[in-house]
Image: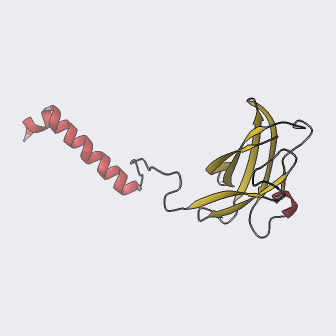
Amino acid sequence: MIRMFASRAGRLLIGVWFVILVTSVTGVNIIPVASKHPGGTSTVKVVLLNSTDGLAHQGQQVTFDVLTTVTDRPYVRLDCYQNQVWVYDQWAGFYPDFTWPWMQTFPLSNSMWTSGEADCTATLYYFGGRGTKDIMSIKFHVYA
């Protein structure tokens, strides 16, 4: 018996036993999870508000169709870039009692983005603990 604990395999078995004991007593999960939000489902879809051809264009407006089981207070942040230069950002809450519901309409223009195409990313997130937690993102192109 003593020889078993003196061998490498014996020390390994003791180490594994110790890790199992500590994690089962403390509730620490050391197995990585594939998803940031296990058990949660989320979707974000771009809704074109005034497109004439089914595409997003600079100067038009979009909003988002948001569905998530991760939080009851989801937010969407939209960031747009022209040739890798950041030209636009806006955020809004997508829950019933959001204080500024008009912010849920995103105009695809501002003083930094007066013309031209852009590549945009809409990120679904929520406030949790020490800051924001991203749930998922979608990308779409805005035409001139």
> What colour scheme governs how the chains and residues are painted in the rendered image of this protein?
secondary structure
Describe residue 3's horizontal placement relative to residue 27 as left or right: left
Q: Quadrant of residue 40 in the image?
A: bottom right
Inspect this view and state whether residue 130 appears.
no
Does the rendering let one see residue 73?
Answer: yes
Which residue appears farthest toward the right when viewing the image?
A: 111
Q: Quarter of the image containing the C terminus?
A: top right
Q: Where is residue 7 in the image (x, y as percent from the top left)?
A: 13, 32
The residue sitting at 80% across, 65% down in the picture is 98
Q: Which residue is drawn at 87% across and 37% down?
A: 113
Q: Name the residue furthest bottom.
A: 96
The x and y percentages for residue 48 are 77, 57
Q: Where is residue 82 in the image (x, y as percent from the top left)?
A: 78, 33
Please state which of residues 64 and 31 is positioned toward the viewer in this rendering: 64
Query: What quarter of the picture does the N terminus occupy?
Result: top left
Residue farthest along the front direction in this orientation: 53
In the shown orientation, is residue 133 left or right of residue 25?
Answer: right
Q: Residue shown at 72%/54% (left/top)?
A: 76
| Residue 132 x/y as whole percent | 68, 49
Q: How many labels does the image show?
A: 0
Classify 72 as above or below 119.
below
Residue 142, by quadrant, is: top right
Above or below, 130 against 97 in this view is above
Which of the pair 83/57 is nearer the observer? 57
Q: For residue 96, what is the image quadrant?
A: bottom right
Residue at 61% over, 59% down: 43
The residue lying toward the viewer, choosing from 72 and 20, is 72
Task: Decide if residue 84 is on the left or right side of residue 20.
Answer: right
Query: 139 or 22: nearer the eye?
Result: 139
On the picture, is 22 further left or further right than 78? left
